Image (tube, rainbow, N blue to C red):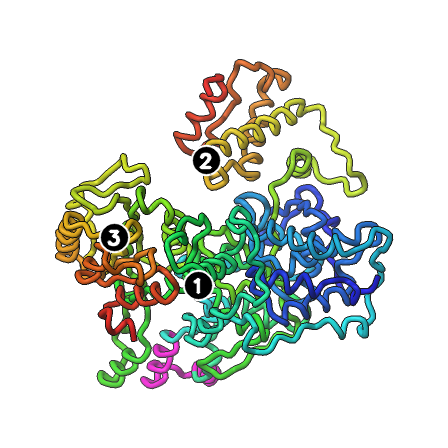
Amino acid sequence: MQKYTGKVQPPLGAEYPEGKPIYPYFPSAELINAVNLAMFLKRPLLLQGEPGCGKTRLAQAVAYELQLPYEVWTIKSTSKAQDGLYTYDNLARLRDAQLIGLNQVKQEQEIERMTDPESYVKLGPLGRAFDHREQRTVVLIDEIDKADIDFPNDLLSELDNNCFTIDETGQEITAQYPPIIFITSNQERDLPDAFLRRCLFHYIEFPERKDLIRIILARHCGVDSQSDSLEIPSGLPWLEKLVECFLKMREVLEQDKGERGKMVSTSELIDWFEVVKEESLTTDPDTIFNDPEQQPPHLSVLLKNRDDHKRYIQWFKGEV
Amino acid sequence: MKVKDLPLRNLFEKLRSVGFVLGVDDYDLLLRALMGGFGVSATEPEAALKQLCETLWVKSEGDRPLFNRCFDDCISESRPESRVITPSPVEPSDISEPIPSPTPSESPDVESTSSEPTPSELADLESTPSESTPLDFPSDVTLEMPDEVRVKKTKERELEEKAGALFRFRDYLPVSEREMKQTWRYLRRPLREGAATELDVEQTVVQVAQRGFLLDPVLVAPRVNRVELTLLLDVDGSMVAFHRLGERLQSTAIGGGRLGRSHLYYFHNCPLDFLYHDRTLTDYSPLDQVLRGLSPRHGAVVIFSDGGAARGGDSEERLEMTAVFLERLRSRVDSVVWVNPMPPERWQGTTAAAIALRVPMVGCDRRGLQRAMKILKGRSLVEAMQ
């Protein structure tokens, strides 16, 4: 059986065929275990954790390492369970039936296609994964809690039996290679017990200081898979201070809002890093983050509302 | 040490007894994983096993502390220091014995593929907390425990004392969070509303058949749940003991329900001309304004108050004020239900009993809440009782 190790990382600047960049991913040992367990038991792995802790990226990283096809199903408030499996273009079928009825279609082949009910089936991400005949597919069901409360329950039997039926054609699609399913949830809504029972669960903790530095360095100068050391390049003398400042900000905001409010996330830290890096090209890098009296630059990348901003500035000036 | 020597079954039973929804399948999953070589480690056998059980059986971040305690109780203490779990995958014969085989009636199987829990599931749920529930924890500990334990504890106390002292307990809880959530799911009025975007295949075909050709497809509005819940919570005074229960009611309605919108207001004893946005009763909206904001068609109002039953006694003044308020409320919305945290047998002889003549009033246990949902969907109290 294939096992996920979390050690295989894409080279710097790696891209998917469609041009999207692939970034390295650093899972914890516990997370790696959970992934392997889910693959072994053929159960979906439900991931929770605060926004920006890497829930969504995991699936991609697993697909990259194991060289498996990857499907994303991003859930919206209007998503229905069936959409992930297939959609049926009734309208096109009606139109075509009419064209044939009016003798508008002459080609034999076209008529054949139009009279075949199966031509109007379009498989969704989960449907395609079930239909894959050569290998397992990694499927990400992103933000499942956004959908209607019935949504997870509507998927139960498909996930249990690894098969589904297309009602319009009677065709049954059974997965020869059950997909590896990752589900993320932001806890906006509670998932039904029946659904939870079929999933394995893992809570992704927010990365620690050294992990944050590792993530930034990996994006900036690639990953050396041989060594675990974190050598900071000479061009970024301010990196540690930036991460320090970021963590302090989280602490300040957490005191204020508890664990409920919006926190500054890893993706915002990365944005911040990019902006500061851009600036460091034109100014002396040693001066950045060096004046304790000076507010950290470009706070607007991190603090997205007035209260947070006010709160942080107050703390910075020592008023709280 | 072989797997069969590990008190895994003890752990499983213990977790079930404190309210984890686990069935035989879940135990089987653990065994399969162990046989697959998961959860074993030469260096840190206990941590590896713990992590495995956690991944399989813990389904939310909130359940983790309780799981940790149960695990420590069962596994750590039972294992003599000198013995180590064998790191090799286990022989199948080793695991045949400890599979628990609860009879179907006691299996905590509350799952269903249907959207609403069926009555039999609900009946199952009632028997979910296993008989070995540890009821001897002090109040402080039970406050952290899952609701099933607290519900059970509350019920036992009710049996024991019947009389007054019951409501002094801080962990008083006549209905569990899970039960509350399930009940809220009944509150829905799916209506076709908004822009027509869904294709109505049948009607389109009918139309084609009539006209002889497809002119344009028949579209219908998508079905949406448009219940707009307004929760009015009585706070302070005799309601202090029920604050947690009120909070629960609100959080489960938002987290577990399928509502179009929801609002929350506070009041003390009886809403007069203002409703408050916060528990401390400082920030307010005029009652008229709130009432105008209620949708006559979609609105549903739940009042959570003891109606004077906690303190006892009959207050003419309170009754009168409440009657006036109810009249104003009902001139705007039909769906109104009063949830009383005091059990029905304690309403008698208090203002609550008189209020119950003017508005459908239910207790705050599972059955009461189920009735409340029926009433909010338009049934009368008598129909809801059936």
Q: Which residue is mark 3?
A: B307
Q: Nearer the viewer, mark 2 or mark 1?
A: 1
Q: Secondary structure at mark 1?
A: helix
Please determine whether, in this image, residue A306 is positioned above or below residue A184: above
The mark nearer the N terminus, 3 or 1, is 1
Q: Is residue A104 magenta?
A: yes
Identify the residue at image location x=24%, y=46%.
B269
Q: Chain of mark 1?
A: B
Q: Counting other residues with Cα less than 10 Å from the Cα at mark 3, is it few (<14), some (14-19), or many (20 or more)? A: many
Q: Do discs 2 and 1 belong to a common subunit?
A: no
Residue B142 located within the stretch drawn in magenta: no
Q: Is residue A158 left or right of residue B343?
A: right
Q: Which residue is mark 2?
A: A257
Q: Tell which of A117 and B24 is nearer to you.
A: B24
Furthest-right residue in view?
A: B82
As drawn, B362 above or below A12: below
Q: Which mark's residue is nearer the viewer, 2 or 3?
A: 3
Q: How far apart in space, not on screen, are marks 2 and 3 (Cα)?
A: 34 Å
The amino acid type found where label 2 is placed reads Lys
Which chain is mark 3 on? B
Q: Quadrant of residue A114?
A: bottom left
| Stretch in magenta | A92-114
